[in-house]
Image (spheres, grey):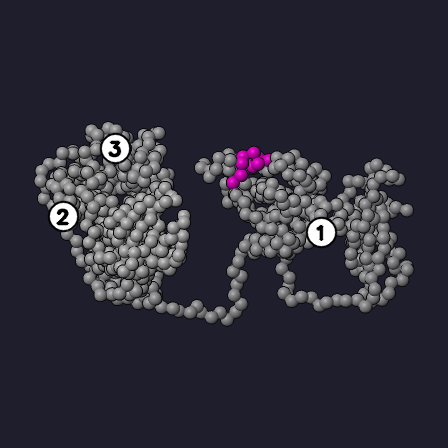
């Protein structure tokens, strides 16, 4: 919210400078965004006289102007403003002047359509005085030529821009800001006369009836209106126009400017209707389905039954609490006015604003809660300004509805201030601070009964009151106490799952995969195919029509990301994601998975076939498990693929038959077809919640490095086994044949075909022996070999191939 320093001083008696005010505002929680003195950037602009304006010979919309800027010579200027004409006074910028509204610097000797232009006649938008860019600024005929425009227009008033949090509706007016500053000690608050103004007679407009059905949302609480008869509308006084321009508002006419003045000055939005444009009886009701509203921003909005309107027999006049309509807007020809000052439900105003997308000054204030006690006094304040600026007669106010007052009372132990903030503040100081903020305290002793003022609905409990005291004492006065020094090793701060998520990301990124973040919602068809689709996991209000279900797997999102990337010409993809999946609405049904996929392989000439396979996915999930402290070879690998995997090209990792912790494999071709992908695609899923904690080692120190001086030796074996026998079973049996000497067993060949029975396969393994204290004799080697053959034969039924 913007306001000028002079405006603030109309409500606050203070000698503080703009910088001092800025520091005080930030200290009390009204953070200063910017403090600007417009005179600094507008100092080069001067008042100028357009001596002559004639059409440009080479353009149908430009004018050639002779401008007197007080230099003694006429300056040639090419101007495209439609209101540029001979004899007018305007604002002129010399070459090398920076134009803030356009963010560029004028150059000298510019030629436009063959004619020289040595300066610029400026609009209000180009000087950032308002949004008006329809023409250049027009000044009165007596404006002195060559005078600095900031001096003539008296623009040297510092503008302060503060950030208002959603709970501080009381600070959306300059008066509310002044009240906080006065409580802080930055000055003395001045009072405003809001006493009732005598009426000239009964109102020709009766109280507006409420036409709301039982149980229907009702945004309006109380409507206060006043009929003004025989006003003389027109431009508002210079002081009012300058005040509005300084904060970025464009003056419209005196009546509208008065409503803006009260809205910004006291945080009390008003709206004015041309009473002669009201057709029949005005009422308060909700909009009808399909009803349209032509707003003051020249846009047509579709309304629904949740939005409250002020309407007459011809339809909506105003979208309540958000924006007025064109049809009933006031103009310079307006003679009779109905001024509205109403109280609204902030939640319903915010809802209407979000649905329509309208961002207005009224909505900004009303959705933050406006003081309900200001409804009728605000109308009286507007009445005084109307009679002063546009004259006429004020008729008797019409009131309908009842307002809602919080009337909050808090039992406040004064010791809460020190307990919650650390500030050692006396009882008398606490009472004085809360009293200056408008709170009323009753009682004596350590606990007081505090009555919260009507303009502070955000204060509901004792912690809020302690915060108010802290704001006024100063956050920088909160004592800084160092944390106690620990004399032992600090405990682990991250949970097991947090550590696993971090390790999973680091491990997969180190393996060359790129992290993706996909939606937690997927289409119903995808949810069903990947093990979800339960009714309880459907979204009541999806953000998009196709994103209807909570995801049971991360793979649909990754496959969708792969599809979008391949559509853009990327043929080699390596993606992973660590995130939550949803198997049920119960807490245990929300799991954390780490999933990844590889697509396309490598086109390098050394690559085997340029395609990925199930073993790439197995390698990725094995690396993940290793990072978690588990060896995949010591877990159970079952050649039963997941539902999304290609038959025979996938498997699962489990700890017993009932605890599956991961899946890996090549994605089924039918699934790839649905995502318009060309395979193969290797993918994996690992349930990070299901992985058990690794066994803790008795010591954190690494074991001693044991190196043998003796050379290792290798022996190869080829076994004929059934095709259904997993190679892992064979490897495990061979390694267990002699745990002392055998250090490694690996498969180097698998053969099926000519010379081998159809139900058999030949598996070649290499067994590495590492002697430790002496060289092995031939007899010892043969004994180990015999043990290997016996162990494999017992475990698999295989025989040594000769």
Q: Residue at x 83, y 43 (%)?
A: 751
Q: From the image, give the main secondary structure of the stretch colored magenta.
A: helix
- How much space separates mark 1 and mark 2, taking CA atoms? 90 Å
Q: Of callouts 1 and 2, which one flags the residue occurring earlier in the amino acid sequence? A: 2
Pick the front one: 245 or 627: 245
Please report the residue visible at 35 percent of the width from the left and 35 percent of the height from the top: 301
Horizontally, residue 657 falls left or right of residue 40, namely right
- Which label lies toward us, 1 or 3? 3
| Mark identifier at residue 388 | 2
**From the viewer's perspective, is 618 left or right of 385?**
right
- Residue in front for this viewpoint, 217 or 281: 281
Residue at 21% x, 32% y: name it: 278
User: Please, what secondary structure does the residue beneath circle 3 have?
Assistant: strand
Asked whether residue 343 is drawn in magenta, I would say no
Are the residues at dot 1 and dot 2 in contact (C-beta closer than 8 Å)? no
Left or right of residue 394, residue 436 in this image: right
**Residue 185, percent across and down?**
24, 64
Whether residue 609 appears in this view of the structure is yes
Residue hosting label 1 = 633
The image shows residue 83, relative to residue 28, as above or below, that is above
Measure the alpha-carbon separation of dots 1 and 3.
76 Å
The residue at the point 32 percent across, 55 percent down is: 75
Q: Position of residue 331 (x, y in %)?
A: 22, 39
* Stretch of the chain drawn in magenta: 521-529
Tag 3 residue = 311
Q: Nearer the viewer, residue 249 or 567?
A: 249
The kind of secondary structure element at disc 1 is: helix
Q: Is residue 293 left or right of residue 725?
A: left
């Amino acid at each position: 919210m913007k306001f000028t320093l002079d405006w603030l001083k109309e409500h606050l008696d203070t000698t503080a400078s703009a910088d001092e005010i800025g520091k005080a505002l930030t200290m009390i929680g009204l953070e200063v965004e910017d403090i600007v003195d417009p005179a600094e950037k507008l100092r080069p602009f001067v008042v100028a006289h357009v001596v002559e304006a004639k059409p440009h010979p080479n353009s149908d919309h430009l004018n050639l102007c002779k401008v007197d800027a007080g230099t003694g010579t006429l300056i040639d200027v090419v101007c495209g403003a439609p209101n540029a004409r001979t004899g007018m006074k305007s604002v002129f910028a010399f070459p090398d002047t920076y134009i803030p509204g356009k963010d560029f610097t004028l150059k000298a000797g510019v030629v436009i359509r063959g004619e020289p232009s040595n300066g610029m006649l400026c609009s209000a938008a180009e000087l950032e005085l308002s949004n008006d860019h329809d023409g250049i600024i027009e000044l009165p005929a007596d404006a002195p030529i060559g005078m600095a425009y900031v001096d003539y227009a008296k623009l040297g008033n510092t503008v302060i821009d503060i950030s208002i949090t959603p709970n501080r509706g009381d600070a959306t007016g300059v008066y509310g800001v002044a009240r906080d500053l006065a409580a802080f000690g930055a000055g003395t608050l001045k009072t405003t006369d809001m006493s009732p103004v005598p009426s000239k007679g009964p109102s020709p407009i009766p109280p507006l009836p409420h036409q709301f059905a039982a149980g229907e949302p009702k945004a309006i609480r109380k409507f206060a209106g006043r009929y003004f008869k025989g006003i003389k509308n027109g431009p508002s006084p210079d002081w009012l126009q300058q005040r509005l321009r300084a904060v970025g508002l464009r003056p419209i006419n005196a009546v509208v400017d008065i409503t803006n003045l009260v809205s910004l000055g006291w945080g009390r939005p008003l709206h004015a209707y041309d009473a002669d444009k009201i057709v029949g009886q005005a009422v308060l009701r909700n909009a009808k389905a399909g009803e349209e509203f032509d707003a003051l921003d020249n846009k047509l909005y579709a309304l629904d039954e949740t939005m409250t309107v002020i309407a007459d027999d011809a339809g909506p006049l105003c979208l309540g609490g958000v924006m007025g309509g064109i049809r009933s807007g006031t103009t310079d020809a307006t003679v009779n006015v109905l001024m509205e000052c109403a109280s609204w439900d902030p939640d319903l105003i915010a809802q209407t604003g979000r649905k329509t997308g309208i961002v207005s000054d009224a909505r900004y204030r009303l959705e933050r809660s406006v003081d309900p006690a200001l409804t009728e006094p605000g109308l009286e304040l507007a009445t005084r300004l109307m009679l002063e600026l546009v004259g006429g007669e004020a008729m008797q106010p019409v009131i309908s509805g009842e307002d809602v007052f919080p009337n909050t009372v808090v039992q406040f132990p004064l010791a809460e201030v020190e307990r919650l903030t650390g500030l050692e503040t006396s009882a008398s100081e606490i009472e004085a601070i809360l009293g200056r903020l408008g709170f009323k305290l009753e009682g004596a002793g350590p606990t007081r009964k505090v009555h919260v003022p009507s303009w502070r609905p955000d204060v509901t409990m004792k912690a809020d009151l302690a915060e108010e005291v802290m704001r006024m004492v100063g956050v920088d006065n909160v004592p800084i106490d160092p944390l106690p020094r620990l004399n032992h090793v600090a405990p682990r701060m991250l949970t097991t799952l947090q550590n696993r998520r971090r390790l999973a990301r680091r491990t997969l990124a180190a393996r060359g995969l790129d992290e993706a973040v996909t939606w937690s919602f997927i289409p119903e068809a995808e949810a069903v195919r990947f093990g979800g689709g339960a009714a309880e996991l459907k979204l009541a209000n999806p953000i998009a029509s196709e994103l209807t279900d909570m995801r049971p797997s991360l793979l649909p999102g990754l496959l969708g990301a792969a599809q979008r990337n391949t559509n853009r010409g990327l043929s080699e993809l390596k993606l992973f994601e660590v995130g939550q999946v949803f198997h049920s609405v119960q807490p245990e049904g929300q799991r954390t998975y780490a999933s990844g996929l590889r697509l396309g392989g490598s086109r390098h000439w050394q690559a085997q076939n340029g395609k990925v396979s199930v073993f790439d996915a197995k390698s990725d999930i094995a690396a993940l498990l290793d990072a978690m402290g588990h060896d995949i070879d010591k877990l159970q690998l079952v050649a039963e693929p997941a539902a999304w995997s290609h038959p025979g090209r996938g498997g699962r990792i489990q700890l017993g038959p009932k605890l599956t912790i991961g899946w890996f494999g090549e994605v089924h071709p039918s699934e790839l077809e649905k995502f318009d992908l060309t395979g193969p695609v290797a993918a994996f899923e690992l349930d990070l919640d299901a992985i058990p904690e690794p066994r803790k080692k008795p010591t954190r120190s690494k074991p001693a490095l044991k190196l043998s001086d003796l050379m290792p030796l290798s022996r190869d074996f080829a076994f004929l086994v059934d095709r259904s026998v997993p190679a892992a079973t064979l490897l495990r049996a061979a390694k267990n044949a002699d745990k002392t000497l055998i250090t490694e067993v690996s498969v180097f060949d698998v053969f099926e075909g000519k010379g081998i029975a159809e139900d058999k396969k030949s598996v070649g393994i290499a067994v590495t022996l590492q002697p430790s204290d002496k060289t092995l004799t031939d007899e010892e080697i043969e004994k180990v070999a015999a043990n290997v053959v016996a162990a494999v034969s017992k475990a698999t039924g295989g025989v040594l191939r000769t």
